[in-house]
Image: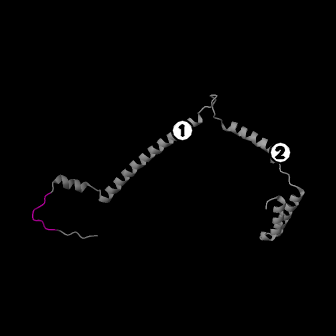
Amino acid sequence: MSESKPFPTLTPVQFSPNLIDSLDKSTDSTITREQRQSQVISNQVSKELDSLLNEKSLQLDSKINSNLLKSNSNNDSIIQGSPELNKKLDSIYNILKSSAEAKIVKSDIVLKAENNVIQCLLKNKGTPLNCWDEVQNFKKIAGNP
């Protein structure tokens, strides 16, 4: 802390009683005033950010609703609920599952090579590189060079 040093004045200084009274009653320091001012500014910024976020949220909601409520050329609504979409997806899944292309049948040679790789990997736990020949043979048989 710095020391306060009195300086002599040539003219006497007189303060009004009102000024002295208001200084005596004031408990604010410079730091307190700065903190209060900072808090007021922070509150104003927070309010402004909240209003901007609310405005953007409302704009986004209205944009989403307008896109959802568009109607196609037959003036039918394209909004579909979750149950309808799930039914459509289930029907597409069942069609794909039952199609002949989805059913891949492995030949006996491929199954034998696959079993060789599996057995080798089980025997050589922790050292899968010992099964290099089996993996290469499987790749050659399966058609993946």
Question: Residue 10 magenta-drawn?
Answer: yes
Q: Name which quarter of the figure residue 30 lies in.
A: bottom left
Query: Residue 53, percent across and down?
Result: 47, 45
Along the line of sight, the residue nearer the viewer: 17 or 126: 126
Residue 122 showing in the rendered view: no
Q: Residue furthest right?
A: 108
Helix, strand or loop under label 1:
helix
**On the image, numbered disc 1 is attached to which residue?**
63
The label number, if any, that marks residue 100 in the structure image: 2
Alpha-carbon distance for marks 2 and 1?
Answer: 43 Å
Q: Residue furthest top?
A: 75
The amino acid beneath tag 1 is: Lys
Question: Residue 32 magenta-drawn?
Answer: no
Q: Is residue 47 above or below residue 4?
A: above
Indicate which label's residue lies in the foreground, 2 or 1. 2
Highlighted magenta segment, given as a residue range: 7-14
Looking at the image, residue 27 sits to the left or right of residue 39; the answer is left
Looking at the image, residue 61 sits to the left or right of residue 43; the answer is right
Q: Magenta part mainly helix, strand or loop? A: loop
Query: Residue 75, percent across and down?
Result: 62, 28
